[in-house]
Structure formats: C-alpha cells, structure tokens
Amino acid sequence: MREKTRPSIKENNAVLQCNATQRASKVLIETIQVSLNDDKAKDIAVINLIGKASFADYMVIATGTSQRQVTTMANHLCKKLKAQGLKSVSTEGLSLGNWVLIDGGDVVIHLFRQEFRTFYDLDKFWGNPLPRPDQAA
C-alpha cells in the first residue's frame, strides 16, 4: 500500500508564497483596469502568463485613440501603481505615445494606439485574454 507523504514546510511556504503573489497580482490588475477605464481605454485585455513566461504573471493590453491619450493613460497608471506601493515602475515609449510599455513587476502593461496594436498583435501572440469582469456571464 502506498503511503501518503505530507508536503514539507518548505513546499507549503512556496505554495503560500505563490498564492500571495497571485493575490497581489490580481489586486494590481484591478487597479490597472480601474485606471484604464477611468481614462477611457478601449479593448482592455488581461492575459495570464503563468506557465508561459518568466518575466511576469499577467499582461494587460489596452488601446488609446491618440498619442496624447496613450501618454496620459500611462502617466496616470504609473502614479496609481506607485501609490499602490510599487517601488519601481519603469516605462518605455512614453515620449512617442504609440506603444508604451509599463513594467509593474508581476504585471506588464502595453498601451497602444490602434494601428500599433493591430500591427504587433500581442493578444494573438500570447494567447486568449481572461474574461473581463464586466463581460462575465
């Protein structure tokens, strides 16, 4: 007969740590979605990267209608992420406003103008987005 083995304390701590990180990521995603909705972002997509990439747990992709809107969304979002307690929030592409990348640690955010989002098509590359809360059945 096979004996059941209990997970070690180290394994339990790793699971707890993983769950805490995922909970923190989900809170971060909520903050991001609220900020982007407030700034009238279009087509907000959240993609689960767990098991697909090592650089982040989630990716958020959103579209702005102009360079000014994309830049404004990025600036507002960076302020909110820092207010949430993220120590280091780095950006790329802010000066042009066509595609802004925000590194939020466990969550990476891509803000695009529509033609850039269509061209790079990260949604298709990284997989199916998670259902949005406002679209849940």
Image (tube, helix red, strand yellow):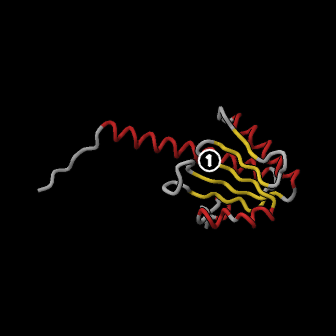
In percent of width and height, residue 104 lies at 65, 42
Q: From what the image shows, is residue 70 above or below residue 78?
A: below
**Amino acid bearing label 1:** Val
Residue shown at the point (75%, 47%) measured from the top left: 35
Q: Quadrant of the N terminus?
A: bottom left
Q: Quadrant of residue 122?
A: bottom right
Give SS at disc 1: strand
Image position of 51 (left or right of 48): left
Q: Nearer the viewer, residue 14 or 39?
A: 14
The total of numbered circles placed on residues is 1
Residue shown at the point (51%, 54%) measured from the top left: 50
Label 1 crowding class (10 Å Cα cut-off): few <14, some 14-19, many 20+?
many
Q: From what the image shows, is residue 89 above or below residue 133?
A: above
In percent of width and height, residue 107 lies at 62, 47
Q: Which residue is mark 1?
A: 107
Q: Nearer the viewer, residue 94 or 26?
A: 94
Q: From what the image shows, is residue 101 above or below residue 10?
A: below
In percent of width and height, residue 102 lies at 70, 45
Q: Quadrant of residue 65?
A: bottom right
Q: From what the image shows, is residue 8 above or below residue 49?
A: above
Q: Nearer the viewer, residue 63 or 41?
A: 63
In percent of width and height, residue 91 lies at 73, 43
Q: Quadrant of the C terminus?
A: bottom right
Image position of 26 (left or right of 109): left
Image position of 79 (left or right of 5): right
Q: Nearer the viewer, residue 99 or 19?
A: 99
Residue shown at the point (15%, 55%) measured from the top left: 2
